[in-house]
Image (cartoon, rainbow, N blue to C red):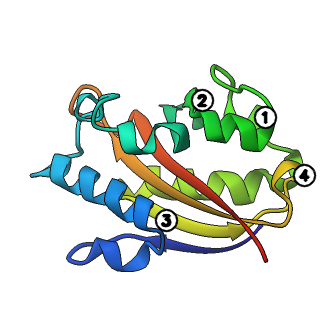
Amino acid sequence: MASLHHGIARPDPQAEVDHRHLRALLSLWNSAHGGPGLPRRSEFTPETLRPWLGHIGILDVERSPLRFRIRLAGTHIVQYFGRECSGQYLDDVIPPTDRDSVLGIYLRCVESAAPQFEASYSHIRSLAGYLVRRLALPVTRAGGDIDQIVVGFYVAELR
């Protein structure tokens, strides 16, 4: 995937995100962030995520080795990929030729402990010819390290 990726740093994190729904999702993360440390996953309930539900994925972050297990894939994400992938490791469902470009945003999210945005032209067969926008938002369940990533995922057909 050819991509434009951006780490999002304060004070103006909205500036990099070029999609209105993803900007709104980032605003939700920022409002949950509030202080030091990461927002808690419990702040992102089905009710608070309702406007984005079909476009939300949740990845569990596992370490030693660092891998991402798909906890939830929204209905639009399932449609884009043509199958349900919940419970599987992301690197097992992405073609080997695309793994580095697909996993990069999540690796940067974990390394930086900060939101990451990427707009990529996809070469994955089911998404070939589409512009994919992803926003990766780090969260914690217990108040420590990142153990989940909330992902906003939107696809636009190239014209």
Q: Residue at x 41, y 77 (%)?
A: 16
Residue 7: image location, x then y, percent = 43, 70
Q: Residue 65, relative to residue 27: is it above or below?
A: above
Q: CA distance from mark 1 to mark 4?
A: 12 Å
Which mark, residue 70?
2
Residue located farthest toward the left when viewing the structure as drawn: 35
Marks 3/4 in contact by CB < 8 Å: the verdict is: no
Which mark, residue 117?
3
Q: Residue 79, relative to residue 12: is it above or below?
A: above
Question: Which is in the foreground here, disc 3 or disc 4?
Answer: 4
Marks 1/3 in contact by CB < 8 Å: the verdict is: no
Element assignment for label 2: strand
Q: Residue at x 70, y 27 (%)?
A: 85
Element assignment for label 1: helix
The residue indicated by pointer 1 is 93
CA neighbours of label 2 inside 10 A, class few (<14), some (14 to 19), many (20+): many
Q: CA distance from mark 2 to mark 3?
A: 19 Å
Marks 1/4 in contact by CB < 8 Å: the verdict is: no
